[in-house]
Amino acid sequence: MDVSIDDSICFFCHFLWDMQKPIIIKSVEGDLFWPLIEKHSERIFDETGLVFRLNQHLQDSEKAKLKELNKEKSGGLTYFFVAEVDGEIAGWSWGRQDGPRTVYMVNSAVLEDFRRQGVYQSLLDHVVAFLVEKGVEKITSRHQCVNNPVIIPKLKKGFVIEGLEVTEIFGTLVNLAFYPNKFHKDLMDYRSGEKKPAPQIKKALNI
């Protein structure tokens, strides 16, 4: 199924590093986003990794209950962005609100022909700017520990490692977080043991 993107919705423009072609970041409605990325997502993730699709192993009754449960959880901020070069989809990123002050970057990807050309950096810059403008106080993401092409740009952007977890679906993941508020970042630096507490941290913690 081919789905076109509304050319009138354009938020951000950057350029491919080697060809100087514009990278257009566009916002897409959810009902258009999923058909747009479906075939690419299956190729990128399923053909190269050990992907476990939980939904394929559930009974119909379990699927029905989960569907109703997700209806109850609906609401809050959700974003769907695609990166486009010369009218072709080059990558995407989507995420959802996870609590009163946090947004979870659920999934991002760049198609093979557009990797290492600045597409992911453009997506990341746009997503962070968009969420900060919305007032989000914490941005989180989870990645397989060896996914350096994604982890390294995020660390350079200012994300920090919050921990590791082992999951039955994805295996071992590294948890990252970005704090737009400097006070929260300073608090994280102190809690992690990296830095001595700044004066405002001492005052807030009464130490």
Image (spheres, helix red, strand yellow):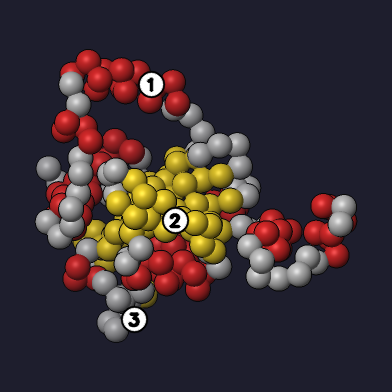
* Residue 69, label in figure: 1
Residue at 85% in and 65% down:
199
Q: Distance between the residues labelled 2 and 3?
A: 33 Å
Spot occupied by residue 138 in the image (x, y as percentages of width and height): 58, 51
Reading the image, the residue beneath label 2 is: 164
Residue at 25% in and 20% down:
62
Residue nearest the observer in this picture, 168 or 78: 168
Reading the image, the residue beneath label 3 is: 17
Q: Which of marks 2 and 3 is nearer the N terminus?
A: 3
Which label lies toward us, 1 or 3? Answer: 1
Q: Residues within 10 Å of mark 3 (few under 14, many from 20)?
A: few
Q: Which picture quadrant has residue 124? A: bottom left
Instruction: Identify which amino acid the numbered label 1 is placed on.
Output: Leu
Q: Is mark 2 on a helix, strand or loop?
A: strand
Residue at 27% in and 44% down:
169
Instruction: Identify which amino acid the numbered label 3 is placed on.
Output: Trp
Residue at 27% in and 82% down:
19
Which label lies toward us, 2 or 1? Answer: 2
Q: How far apart are marks 1 and 3 (CA)?
A: 44 Å
Instruction: Identify which amino acid the numbered label 2 is placed on.
Output: Leu
Q: Earlier in the sequence, mark 2 or mark 1?
A: 1
Q: Earlier in the sequence, mark 1 or mark 3?
A: 3
Residue nearest the observer in this picture, 179 or 171: 171
